[in-house]
Amino acid sequence: MWIVEGSAGGAATGVRWNPSDNATNLSGGNRVAAITNNSPVLIGRGVRSATGKNSGKWYVELRSLRFRPERVFCGFDIDGDQDLFTATSTDFIGPETMASTAPLTATTESVSVDATGTAIELLSGDAIALALDLDGGKLWIGALRPWEHGIAWHGAADPASGAGAQYTGLPAGTYYLFCALAANDAAIEAAAEIPEIARGRAPSGFAVW
């Protein structure tokens, strides 16, 4: 669950996982998506948002809830045609992986945030922040630390000014928030959460989705 803290961080979030995308189990008012696996076979399950965006500037946060050898592909599915039952993302824009670095006792997660494989480190309780500019075709990725409302944008980028985006030249289409959760027998459960209240402050010009 999210750490209970003050409400000074940000606006209420309207984005929710789609209950019709039944590849995962949903809870928390459709904010938490999870899969459970008790077999030795790697199982992948996906979920996407109930609503999509095809224009404007949007800010959204995601958090992985488990520190086990899971894999969580989190970002955006273009036009809602990503296969929900695969562990590998295909029609996808966003951080390559969110993955724990050691089973059970890990305290950090490494996230590849751009096409070159450049990574940032997340500590327990951190979240991924995404700033999506559909009019300019850009995506920025940052880390959001517990108890803080300021976002550490990767590469000291500045979404408000349009500088330093990890992804540029994004194709036109309807973008859905998307997570593909993968778990094997050592990763009993993988889960991803959208906060009810955005902890981070959306960049100037961006609206909280």
Image: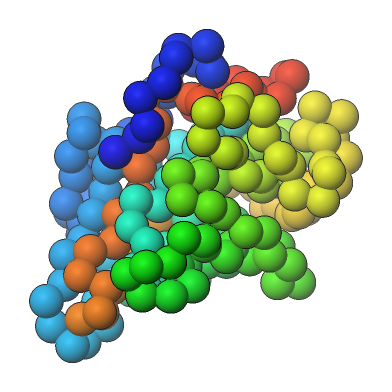
**Quadrant location of residue 189?**
bottom left
Horizontal side of 58 relative to 192 (left or right) equals right
Seen as rendered, the residue at the extreme front is 105
Horizontal side of 82 relative to 149 (left or right) equals left
Most foreground residue, 163 or 142: 142
- Residue 26, horizontal then vertical, whole percent: 19, 45
Seen as rendered, the residue at the extreme top is 8
Can I make out residue 47 in this image?
A: no
Horizontal side of 12 relative to 56 (left or right) equals left
Q: With respect to residue 166, does 50 lie above or below?
A: above
Q: How many marks?
A: 0
Q: Residue at x 45, y 12 (%)?
A: 7
Can I make out residue 165 in this image?
A: yes
- Residue 3, horizontal then vertical, whole percent: 37, 32
**Quadrant location of residue 23?**
bottom left
Seen as rendered, the residue at the extreme left is 38
Tell me which colouring the rendered structure shows.
rainbow
Q: Residue at x 59, y 62 (%)?
A: 111
